[in-house]
Image (cartoon, helix red, strand yellow):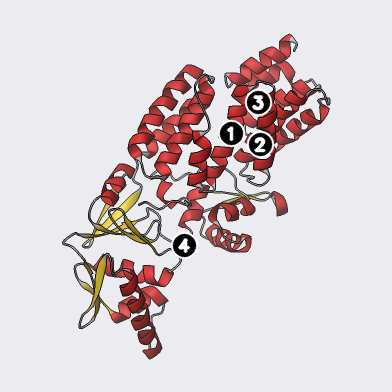
Amino acid sequence: MDSLIAAAARALAAGDALGALKRVALREDPPALALRGVAMAQLGEHTLARELLRRAGRGFGAHEELARARCVLAEAEVALAMRDLTGLPRNLVAASATLEAHADHANAQHARLIGVRRLLLLGRLEEAAAALAACASDGLPPALQAAAGLAAAELALRSLRTGPARVQLDRAQAAAERARVPALLAEVIEARAALERPAARRLQAGVEAPLRLAEVETLLASKALVVDACRRGLQVGATWLPLARRPVLFALARALAEAWPGDVDRNGLIARAFRTRRPDETHRARLRVEIGRLRALAAPLARIEASERGFALRPRGRQAVVVLAPPVDGDQASLLALLADGAAWSTSALALALGASQRTIQRALVELERLGRVRSIGRARAQRWLAAPLTEFTTILLLPTALSLA
């Protein structure tokens, strides 16, 4: 490694992309191409960075297996920043094995952390927790220790464990300060700020109040009957009744909870559940059927009693009934939450993260673009979607997740 390559590498490790480019911008040898690719990635030029890293990987000879693995690792991180979530696991596993075989333990751990971050983006929290448990941060450079702390904090936040999240953020901030990388420290500070911003709305007896994540955690741990409109279900303490796949039943449960301790007339329930303003006898018959289904499912948690005008929700004990509403209501709330990170997403990556078809995501994006909530860049296969960061609240509760809150 010549002196210019070494100096450029040190500049990149400190987050000085421009300083690195000054040393290798005019060189075309594989090590210089790789460093240029990393520098361009730090400057946000992800497409060019990916091309430079691929050229560098092709330029290294068959005997330079370690250098090629490092190029694959850097390209995988660029792909994650571009929200290209396909093809990462296989490449990362192979690169991590090669790095371990050559005793490059720091970069091998880096590869594992990229895999953890991908799983977090996809909402596969159980898999992310298992993968993170296999990552030992002891002995790693401060920058990687901070990245591991951020991943652990995000996992805790997504699982609504704010205490462990604060501990991990403290560790991440201390490591980021030792690393002296401004972008990394800014990421930690932004993650900490999410703890202090409103994350949901509490609706109870006609009164609405914003809640921070710690207050949401306290509410869900209480004895109140919570109708959770963020993850679509009913909860009392550790008992969780998911209704995400039963939208009509959840709409009825939420309408009844919002009216508690009063009742809701039949026409109001029909309008909420079936989205019609002109109910007829078929709607009333269907309402009786759906109320019967909801009554049977919710029996361990609450009763649904008939009244003169309609129906009322009655919890089994003397606890209160609370609706936990998302900060952004609407069918596209989870889509906006993913876009709120400021990164450019492809429709295929959004579909993968939300578990929906790509055509469904495209229709939703077109509608949001018409309303001015999102914007697109590029065309055809290169088209990406962005939204302005939602700085006034955190979207943690709206992100896809495979774990219940129980």
Vertical placement of residue 28 versus 360, above or below = above
The amino acid on which the numbered mark 1 sits, given as a three-letter code, is: Arg
Report, in whole angstroms, how far the alpha carbon at label 2 lies from the one at label 1. 8 Å
Tell me: 107 left or right of 48.
Answer: left
The amino acid on which the numbered mark 4 sits, given as a three-letter code, is: Asp
Which residue is at a point 24% across and 71% down the rendered structure image? 303
Report, in whole angstroms, how far the alpha carbon at label 4 lies from the one at label 3. 45 Å
Which residue is at a point 55% across and 44% down the rendered structure image? 119
User: Which one is earlier in the sequence, the residue at label 3 or at label 2?
Assistant: 2
The answer to whether residue 149 of the structure is visible from this angle is yes
Q: Residues within 10 Å of mark 4 (few under 14, many from 20)?
A: few
Residue 230 at what x, y percent from top left? 39, 56
The amino acid on which the numbered mark 3 sits, given as a three-letter code, is: Glu
Report, in whole angstroms, how far the alpha carbon at label 1 lies from the one at label 3. 11 Å
Q: Residue furthest top?
A: 3
Report, in whole angstroms, how far the alpha carbon at label 1 lies from the one at label 4. 34 Å
Tell me: 15 left or right of 1.
Answer: left
Which residue is the site of mark 2? 93
Report, in whole angstroms, how far the alpha carbon at label 2 lies from the one at label 4. 36 Å
Give the label on residue 282, or none.
none
Q: Nearer the viewer, residue 14 or 228?
A: 228
Q: Residues within 10 Å of mark 2 (few under 14, many from 20)?
A: some
To which quarter of the image does residue 71 belong? top right
Which residue is the site of mark 3? 100
Residue 235 at what x, y percent from top left? 31, 58
Which residue is the site of mark 1? 112
